[in-house]
Image: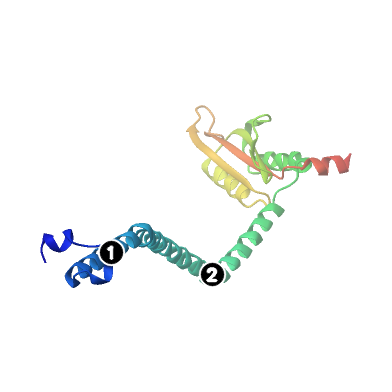
Amino acid sequence: MNMEDFSNLDPKNFGNWPIPVKALIILVLCAGALFAGYWFDTQIQIAELGDVKAKEGELKKEFKTKQLKAATLDKLKEQLAQIQTILKELLQKLPDDAKVSELIREISQTVLANGLKQELFKPQYGREESKEDLYVALPIKLRASGNYHAFGKFVSDVAAMNRIVTQHNVSIKTKKGNKKHSLTIEMMAKVYYQKQVEEDKKSKK
């Protein structure tokens, strides 16, 4: 096949063209069709396939996570029930704000019952610590004098109370000139009570 084969071609008489020329033209057309198919269709499909594979990986991870959650669901429900039971028991130990004065008085009486000399007992009203709608913590500044045995009994009695009372920043110092009350204890006690909801207040009114 040479250039003369192309120069003598009659476009209207394709059937009489030389076989090599027809084969070359058909080959070029097929290549063009394949390229066009790749450019306009296959390339898009390859990109979509990549996206699908990436999404498949994400879905597999999500499935494994959900499968793990489903496998531990019963145990989580059991733990939730235990937590709710514990929370209910703790809330039952919290007085409402109407009974806080009674609890404060009980702590003060515990100081005296253990032979301690009460030097300071001051509830810090206005400095309450609120935790959402669960509880309110009222700090009480306390200072008393006595001996180690009385201090230990007092701390033990407060810890054994039916109500929740925590003790913070405890410090003990030597006190001169008084053998019976030779030591001074200072601490910040906190009493906890239920926060009264506005609806409860309205209903009481």
Provide residue 3's location: percent of width, then percent of height: 12, 60
- On the rendered structure, is 151 left or right of 61? right
The quadrant in which the C terminus is found is top right
Please name the residue shown 67% across and 46% down the image: 134
Local secondary structure at mark 1: helix
Provide residue 141's location: percent of width, then percent of height: 61, 32
Provide residue 66's location: percent of width, then percent of height: 51, 66
- On the rendered structure, is 184 left or right of 54? right
Rounded to the nearest angstrom, the CA distance separating label 1 from label 2 is: 58 Å
Asked if residue 81 can be seen in this view, the reply is: yes
Amino acid tagged 2: Ala
Tag 1 near tag 2, CB within 8 Å:
no
Question: From the viewer's perspective, is residue 100 above or below residue 36?
Answer: above
Foreground of the two, 12 or 156? 12
Asked if residue 180 can be seen in this view, the reply is: no
Foreground of the two, 100 or 20? 20
- On the rendered structure, is 47 left or right of 156? left
Q: Quadrant of residue 38?
A: bottom left
Amino acid tagged 1: Leu
Q: Tag count in the figure? A: 2
| Residue depth check, mark 1 versus mark 2: number of the one nearer the observer | 1
Please name the residue shown 67% across and 29% down the image: 126
Q: Which mark is residue 29?
A: 1
Q: Outermost residue, right direction? A: 205
Q: Quadrant of residue 192?
A: top right
Coloring basis for residues: rainbow
Provide residue 75's location: percent of width, then percent of height: 55, 69
- On the rendered structure, is 167 left or right of 135? left
Q: Outermost residue, left direction? A: 2
Q: Which mark is residue 70?
A: 2
